[in-house]
Image (cartoon, rainbow, N blue to C red):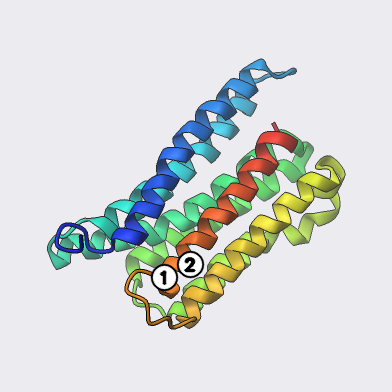
Amino acid sequence: MKKFFREPVNGFTHLFGAIVSLVGLILLIAKTLMSYPSSNLKLTAVIIFGMSLIFLYTASSIYHLINSTEKVLKFLRRLDHSMIFILIAGTYTPICLITLTGRLRWIIFIAIWSMAAAGVLFKMIWFSMPRWLSTLFYIAMGWFVILFISPVSRVINLRGMIWLVLGGIFYTVGGIIYACKWPKLNLKVLGFHEIFHIFVLLGSFSHYICILKYVV
């Protein structure tokens, strides 16, 4: 299979993620339109979240599946890594714009998207940054919400917070596995990178449940 696809396990797991994300976005839009009160801001927030999932998993699956020139693969890898920042900010968006109110809503929203823009810029300019540094950036950005845990926990109930934190844990464990290149398995189809991809899927699923059931 590697004759046709560079990294079939990594590529197809995230292609699955892209397809499920599209279905998930449709469900989010439907629930938002049927919810009361519904608003353009609410609809925009869930679309941003859903599209950020689709963008990440599509970029990742294309990069890991296609065989191409080194120049094309370098561009796709930059795009793949950049979409991580977009997904983090996209996940924050419905929490900011739907559950929070007042100035805090916009403070967190602007801060997280500014960090995402900076992260994308860093990836485009300094892609060779150490793996541990870029992973630290992702994790710090993802857990930025801890600074505002009190107001967030007042507007998302305990079950929702459990899903939110669980998603963060999945992403963090996956990031550590990726940064450390561990575990080193002597298997042809399963290594640290494939395990990292599985943890990313689990993190996305957890945050999706949080937003679908406890935010929208």
Residue, x 41% and y 74% (percent of image)?
191
Gap in angstroms between the C-alphas marked 2 and 1: 5 Å
Number of marks in the image?
Answer: 2
Rendering coords of residue 4 (x, y %): 16, 57
Residue, x 52% and y 58% (percent of image)?
200
From the viewer's perspective, is 135 left or right of 143?
left
Rendering coords of residue 178 (x, y %): 47, 74
Q: Are marks 2 and 1 in contact (CB under 8 Å)?
A: yes
From the viewer's perspective, is 20 left or right of 59?
right
In the image, residue 179 above or below residue 52 = below
Q: Amino acid at mark 1?
A: His
| Label 2: how many Cα within 10 Å (few below 14, some 14–19, many 20+) | many
Give 112 or 53, whichever is nearer the viewer. Answer: 53
Residue that carries the numbered disc 1 in the rendered image: 193
Give 56 or 122, whichever is nearer the viewer. Answer: 56
Give 216 or 8, whichever is nearer the viewer. Answer: 8
Q: Amino acid at mark 2?
A: Phe
Q: Is residue 215 visible?
A: no
Residue, x 48% and y 45% (percent of image)?
53
| Label 1: how many Cα within 10 Å (few below 14, some 14–19, many 20+) | many
Residue that carries the numbered disc 2 in the rendered image: 196
Q: Secondary structure at mark 2?
A: helix
Q: Is residue 212 visible?
A: yes
From the viewer's perspective, is 196 left or right of 60?
right
Corner quadrant of residue 9: bottom left
In the image, residue 3 above or below residue 153 = below
Q: Secondary structure at mark 1?
A: helix
In the image, residue 50 above or below residue 189 = above
Quadrant location of the C terminus in the rendered image: top right
